[in-house]
Structures are given as structure tokens and as C-alpha cells.
Amino acid sequence: MTAQVTLKSGEKVRINDHVYCSPPWSVRDGTPYSIARIMEFLPPEGAGKGKGKGKEIYTRVRLAWYYRPSDVSDRPVADSRLLLAAIYSEICDINQLRSRCHVLHRDKITDLAGWKKRPDRFYFNRLFDPYIKKEFDVIQATDVRNLPDNIRQVLISRYEYVVAEKDVVPDLTDTLRLCATCSEWCANPDTVGCDRCKNFFHMSCVQPPLLAKPSRGYGWTCAPCSKRHEEEVDKHDVRHPTPITKPKSNAPAPRGRGRPRKDRSLAEKEENVDIKYFKMWPFRYFGQYTVAEDTLDPDDLIFPRSATRVGPKYQATVPTTVDVPSPSDPEQRGGDYTVEVLSAINTLTDEEITEMEAWKVVLSRTQEKLHSVDWLTEALRRFSQAHLLNRGWSTVDMSVIPTRPEKWKKGETRHTDREWTADEVTAFEDGIFLYGAELRAVHDEIGTRSMAEVVRFYGHWKNSRLKEENAQIRATRLKAKDEGKDEVPSATAVVTDQFSDDEGSVMPGVSRHNNSCGACRTRESEIWWRAPKGLVTDILCDTCGTNWRKYADLNFRTVREDAAPSSKKGSDKREGTPLNGPSAKRVKTSTSASVNATPPPNAPTAPQLRCLACQKNGPVGKVLRCNQCQFRVHAASCGVHVDKSVIDSWMCDICQNEETLESSMHTDCLLCPRRKSKKKAQFPNADSFLRASKPTEGQGWAHVLCAVFTPEISFSDVSQLRLVEGISTIPKQRWASRCTLCGETSGAVIRCSDCVREYHSSCAWRKGHHFGFEIQPVRHPRRDGIITTFKGETGNMVPIVCCQEHENSRRELYDVCETDETGETALQVYCRIYKQAPVTQAHALLRKARRLDQTLNISTDNTTSVDVSAEPALQCDMCSTQYSPAFHPSEHYSGRWRCHKCHFEHRHGVGAGHSPDDSLSPLDDTMDG
């Protein structure tokens, strides 16, 4: 009798049924359900088998997982019913099973469109292997024909499907190939086919034998066909037949089987189709790296395989040493000198061990250290050293030196990690939320800890979470006992309360007037579900909540009435339009380790937002969304530094200016052409990167793109890309040139890096021209300017703008949002090095005045001025003031200075409030006389 289990939803499931599986909401944190196949039911861990059939107690289940395409790739997939099979199993708690679903291979579904319209229906046609991170095609075993009869019959009798590479599938589904020489079966690896006679040969059967197959793109012909072709060429009788093509017809294509039938009998027959399983798996690998005869062995591995990395291509060929003198008296490894003694406790007597344990307790007053593995390991090592050196136990001290020397290392290492700060713990937990157990990415997120420290802290952090969960379970049991329930509550009742999905994901007490669905914006729903992070609101209606949990899709799709009858009559019109939901990845947890030594599936990721600058997805926090206009951009590419607590309420500069009114309400870019329109001025479109604007020194606005790619522009603070300076220094001819894209003569143009075309930066961005940064190598670093290093390349970083026609350019450009190993974008690096205004040399008003002098061509007669911040003790020789934007050296006396006002009054001979004679000091009168 087949084992049967009743789920919490009331459905009965058996072995080989497909189910939804998910931990409680607090653990999965908004990720959709996982889909798996039940392989077997298992009793509690450590318990024996039950007596008698039907009396077994099952608390665990072995599941064969399916992946969603978004779990293994960032490619967007519109079909939410498509899955990827996997040869991966895991043991989970039986209470994680939610409800039943149906998964079939694509070839076994007659009406795919009708299948996808029915609820809880999925299909697959490919398999993902977590070992080698590669996808394979899945075909029915009955479609494999290019095999000997004995091998084919064994393959069909055991397995329902065959897994192979995409290039191998046509060879497997071809007719049986026999060698034209020996009449034996031609296996694909050692077979070559003639392009003329279409016969197949073993590579060893042809004369002379072939050592390798022809390269890709080249053909091969057998000897008789080659000789026949040479004779035809010599006779000049070669006439290639004219290909016969059918005349084109305007008639519609044949409808084939006609419209798909909608009867329920066909669908139910497909749902209950019999699938063959061998050792609990319906498929096995039979591809490029499979030996066909190995299929006969029932113990042969079914997992996909890849090419072996053995040979000179992957291993270094080390030549033998010739005439190399050997070192005198080499140090023998493994001896007493080279071995580092970690512990010698096994050599102690019982009395010595008792005495040592007494001393170990007094080494630390904190109980946490006495139970710390790292602390105990170091304490035992120091006790062992004291014993080997015949020193007393009192010489061991663990509070003085936190480091210890190690053999074969130059410096000392800490025996325990230093305490983690609150900021580091917060960064660690944020990394776990974003990347799951991918500790390499978590290490990059923290930035201040080594990889070994991150791994060790992850173990302690995970144990602390398990401690909290166990404490909650014990508290629940004690509460149930106090309320008068059974003294020992059943395991099913406890786990049911813990894993109740409705308690964690249903939102109680939601008012329809103040809330709306985060996907479809409706305000009417019988049940409200918690929404994943990243949506407009934190709730979903019943339909969108079901679509998200089951199909990982927030696009509303209707369900066939005959498939899922609804309690409502009629159709209710939904408000608003559906939005695309975040492509969050699912999470799978288990109560015990997997029996198969298979790597775990990909960890969950946070909801993603698409940046309008690079059109790539990124997690919330790195990609920000304006709370008012919904503008989305990488924070590092817009000069934004936002605290994690206010990410959801962040507003772009233009929206923020509507409240603060610090800059002009006319937000047109000063570097772009002024559009002549009678309409009221509108803000930049929030669906374009040109929405990113920064205020200028004159309280105007400029696009971040225009300011960065205009060479004369600089920023007062490059960390925030504000304020924009230097617009007046742009040459006049750049303002008067006509843009080749919009035809306007106003606005500052830039030139294409590969041709002579000139256009506005905003026009080039709208037309899809290429924007990026190039690292140009330098020969003389001191003479060729400032150099920088980005992603391993060193040289001058130059902004590049290329037309669309230059797609084949050999330039290697870094995108605006492309980051290096430190997480800094290319735009940040360029602005930090080349776009910072000299704020330490002069005040903002003085810098603006000097640029105005340059624009008006006012000569300064090469006189030099000194900033007041550099020499605070300077004093004017004429008016004795110590406050001036700049001090100028005296023309007649060295070491004496004049303030900015006296300097120009003396030069022009007319002062404000006194005569030219009064403006000169007595010493100056003597020199002038």
C-alpha cells in the first residue's frame, strides 16, 4: 500500500505527487513557494520504523526540488509556469508542505495554453544542474532511437526522460547509425559522417584512421565520395541541381489539430499519466560524456557530467631540473622541529589533568569564554607548552596577549576574533538578507572583515538564531501547559502552530479606505496578504497574494472558470493596472542535512529595482526609488548617501526642492537647449536618467549626465555631485554650434569621441548613444596628468561619448554604473579624481569671480594672490585689515601685502572715499617720486 499523508489544507498526497513547499513567513521573508516532488516519507530522526502497515508516523519528507528560471539566472522570463527540473533532493519537515500542484514535461501536454490557464499547473523541458551550473535539455526516453536495442530497452524500461546537451539531442533522436565498414553501432564521440553519401564511419575504420573530428564549420567526405567528386571535376560534367522550391502561397497555414479541446477528461488524463521512476528518479544523464554501455549498470551515476580538466591545457608541465644544486641538509618535514604542537593533553596524568582543569576555570571570569571553542583551543595550547617546558600551570595567562605566533608565518595571529561592532553586525545582517548564505558577497558588503572572520561569525550568528527559535518553542509549550492542555503536546500540534502560513502572511484588520494592493492597486479583497519588500504598499489582495506565493508573479491573470470555480458571481472590475513584481528568489530550509552530497540551491535575494541609467537590476538600497516620482537610479551614480532607515522615504533632488525651495522651480538643464513652447514648464520625465539633476552655484539646475561629460564643469562636493560650477567657462563656439540630433543652436554641445559630430549630452542619451569611461594608458605618469586604477587598469580615465554607428569601436568602455572591487562606480571614481573644484584654494564667490575675469579677459598682470585660509596672519600694509578674500604682494616691497580692495584702488588710482594721493603710503610716494 502506498503511503498517504493528509496535509493541513485537507488534501491527501502520495509519493511522486508534486507539492508547494515553504517554511513560515518569518523565515522565508516574502519569497514565493518552492515546488518539489515527494520522493518518500520518513519517520522522525533517530526513530525506528513503525510496526505494521498504515501505522507509521511520518514527520519528514524527502523532496526533489524544481527551480524557477529566476532562481538560477537574471534573465527575465515572462512565463510564470515554466520550471527547471533538477537532480537534487533534500529532507524537510512534513509541515512545510502547503498544497498539491501538477508538473508535467512539455511533450506530454497536448494543450499548453489551456494547461497554463488552469491553477497550480506547471511544466518543464530543461534541467539545471547545481554542480556545474549548467542547463540541459530533457527529452522523453522513447524519443531516443540512435542506440542499440538492448541499451535502448533498458533505458526506456527504467526512465521516463533523458537529460542531454542541446547539441547532442539531434544525434540521440536520429535513426540508428551503423558503420558503413563494420556494420556496428556508431557512438557519437568516435563517429564521423560523410557530407555527400550521409553514411557514418568509425574513426578507426576509415583508411587512414582519423585521429580527431573535423573542426567546427568543416565537413568530411569518405574516400569513394572524394574520388567520385574528383572524377566529376575532371570531366567538367558537374552540374549542381537547381533546388526546387514550392511557390509561395497567400493561403493561411494549416491549423493541424484544430483548436485545443477544453474538455476536463483530457486534462485529468494528463494529470494522472503514469511516470516511470528508477531509484526514485524519472530521468538520467545520457549526453556527450556518457558511455552508452554504462546505462546497463543499475548503480551508474545519473548526474550530469562535464569534460575532465586533465591534460596540458589545464595542468602545468613542469620540466625536469637539470644541473640544479640541491640545498644542503634540507629540513625534513614531519619532524619535531617542523611540527607545531597544538595540544599535549594526552601525555598528562589524571592528577595533572585535574589540576589543569582547576587552573583553567580561573583564567577567565566570563562564562562565554569558558565555552568558546577558539578560547579553549588556545588555552589548551598554552597549557601544553607550559607542560613541555616544565613550567607550572600558574604561568599560563590568557588575559595579556590576545595573539599567538604560528609556524611558517611572519606575524602573530589572533586566537579569537575581535568584537564585532554594531555597524558591522548590521552590515552582516543586511548582506544575509540580500545574498543569503553566499558569504563571499556578504564579505564584500561588510568590507572590514576577512573571509575567515565572516565564516566564523556566520556560524555563531546562526546558532544564536536557533537558540531564539528553540526558546520560543519551549515558551509555547509551557504556555499550552499552563492553559490546561495536555501535559505533553503532540509534535504535530506544535509544529503546526509554528509553521502556520496564515498566521504569518495574512494581514488582519486592513481597512479598504486607507490601503491598496501593492500590485494591482485595488482596495477590495476578502483576504489581505503580506507583500514582499519593494512594492508601493506592504499588502497584496487575495488574487495577487496567491499569484505571488504560487507563481512568483504579480501580473494579474484570469483563471478559467471551469478549472477553479469562484464563490463570487460575476466579474469585479479591478482598479488600476498591474505592476511587475520583484524577481525575488525562493528559500528552502530543512530540518536535517541532505542525504545526497549535492550543493544547496541558490540562496534567496531581496526584491530588485531596475536602474534607469544602466537598465540593470539591483537590490533596494543600492538602487533607490523616489518616494514621490518613482524615479529609480543607482545611489552611487547620483551622488546619494541615504541612511538605511529612510530608504523607503528617499526623494530625488527635484522632488526635495519642491519642499525646501532652495533652488529654482524651473528645473530645465542650463546646458541643454531651451525649448520654445507655450506650454507650462514641466519637470523632467521620471522614466529617464535625465531626471537626475543637481543644483548649480546660481541656484539653477543641470543634468548629472551633462555635468559629468562636459569637461569644463566641476562640483563643489563630488561625494554628492553638488553644486555644479564652471558653466561660464565653456567656450562660446560650443554654445553657438548646431546639434546634429535636434538642430538647435542653443545649449553646450560635446563632440563624439570617434567622429566630428557635435550634439547635446541629453540628445545623445535619448538617441541611445554610448556613454562610458575609458582607461587610457600613459607613458610618463608625471607629465601626462593624474592617473588612476579601475578594475585592474591603470591610466588616465577619460569620459567617452560615441555615436550609435560606432558599435564596432575597439574602445573598452566602463559603464556609468559599473563598479570595481571596492563598490565604487566608474562615475564616482572619475568625479572624485577629475571633477572636484579647488575648494581649499579659494571661496566659492572668489572662484566664481575668477572665472568671470577669465570670461571677460581681465588681465591680472601675472600678479599672484594668496588665500586667507593659507596665511591667516597676513595684514594689509595700507588699511591694516586682516580680513580679505585674497591678499596681493606689494609691488615695491617684499614681505608686505595688500588686501583685495586696496590692491585694485591703488592700481586704478581712485579709491572709494579718498584721493589717489591718500591711497599711497609714504614709502610708495618715495618710490614713485
Image: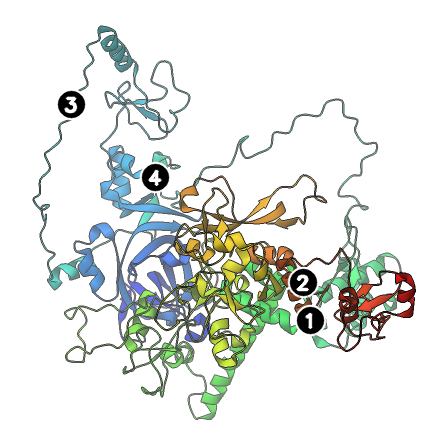
Q: How is the image coloured?
A: rainbow
Q: Nearer the viewer, mark 3 or mark 1?
A: 3
Q: Residue at x 67, y 72 (%)?
A: 421
| Res. 415 in view | yes
Kindly indicate whether the residue at mark 1 contacts the one at mark 2 (C-beta within 8 angstroms): no
- Residue annotated with mark 4: 295
Crowd tier of the residue under label 3, counting other residues whose Cα lies within 10 Å: few below 14, some 14–19, many 20 or above: few
- Residue annotated with mark 2: 850
Residue 452 percent coordinates (x, y): 64, 58
Crowd tier of the residue under label 4, counting other residues whose Cα lies within 10 Å: few below 14, some 14–19, many 20 or above: many
Q: CA distance from mark 3 to mark 4?
A: 46 Å
Q: Is 830 placed left or right of 693 in the picture?
A: right
Q: CA distance from mark 2 to mark 1?
A: 68 Å
- Residue annotated with mark 1: 371
Sequence-earlier tag: 2 or 1: 1
Q: CA distance from mark 3 to mark 1?
A: 87 Å
Kindly indicate whether the residue at mark 1 contacts the one at mark 4 (C-beta within 8 angstroms): no
Q: Secondary structure at mark 3?
A: loop
Q: Nearer the viewer, mark 2 or mark 1?
A: 2
Q: CA distance from mark 4 to mark 1?
A: 52 Å
- Residue annotated with mark 3: 242
Quadrant showing the N terminus: bottom left
Q: Residue at x 87, y 69 (%)?
A: 394
Q: CA distance from mark 2 to mark 4?
A: 84 Å
Sequence-earlier tag: 3 or 1: 3
Q: Is 634 placed left or right of 95 in the picture?
A: right
Q: Amino acid at mark 2?
A: Arg
Crowd tier of the residue under label 1, counting other residues whose Cα lies within 10 Å: few below 14, some 14–19, many 20 or above: few
Sequence-earlier tag: 3 or 2: 3
